[in-house]
Amino acid sequence: MKSSLSLIGIGFLCVTATAGNAPDPASPNLHQLMKNVVAVQTQVIWDLGNQAQDDKGNPDASKLKPADWTRIIQASTQVKQAAQTLATAKHVRAAGPGEKLQSEGNPGAFGGKEVQAVIDAQPEAFRAFARALAASLDPVTAAARAKDAAKLFDSSGAIDQVCEDCHVQFWYPNQKNQ
């Protein structure tokens, strides 16, 4: 009985010691949030925003139905929530075990381990980008609530710039020197 308790105690110590080195499962998964929420929902915003144009490319709110404006509000809300999750997380996991990033394996593209290293080295810069992304959704939501196609066009373009700036620093930093 005494040896069984000793083995259980040793096992507990081993699990406790390795748990400090393992990624926190509560940490948000950047790859999953980007792939399943941010990319999908920003595409909704951009696609509907592109529909809100006349034949000459000028903003035209009459091209969207009330349901389209509602979809834009819902999409911007989801992206903002994902960004706020990343901005407030104590730690962010670039990807889960076995997950391969979209461009992983391409020349000059980072894989999950490299992205993780950059995020871990600059966590406050990463959080700042996440906060900027969250803030960039406020004008989109306001434009959709006002059914203002011109403001939607301008604000949806700002989202793209925030995304690109973050990607250059954390996803493919080798390209910023090109």
Image: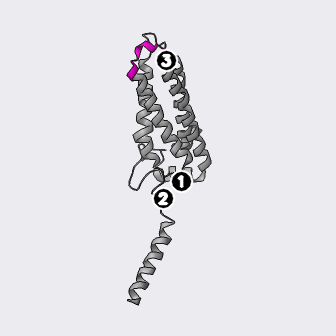
Please determine whether, in this image, residue 103 is positioned above or below residue 74.
Answer: below
State whether residue 148 appears in this view: yes
Residue 75, percent from left and from top: 44, 32
Q: Which residues are magenta?
A: 59-67
Q: Which mark is residue 91?
A: 1
Label 1 sits on a secondary structure element that is loop
Query: Dot 2 corresponds to which residue?
Result: 24
Q: Position of residue 49 (x, y in %)?
A: 45, 22
Amino acid found under the numbered disc labelled 2: Asp
Work out whether 173 lies above or below 155: below
Establish if 76 lies above or below 108.
Answer: above
Q: Earlier in the sequence, mark 2 or mark 3?
A: 2
The answer to whether residue 165 is left or right of residue 5 is right
Q: Nearer the viewer, residue 146 or 99?
A: 146
Upstream in sequence: badge 1 or badge 2: 2
Percent coordinates x, y for residue 28 in the rendering: 47, 50
Which residue is labeled 3 in the image? 149
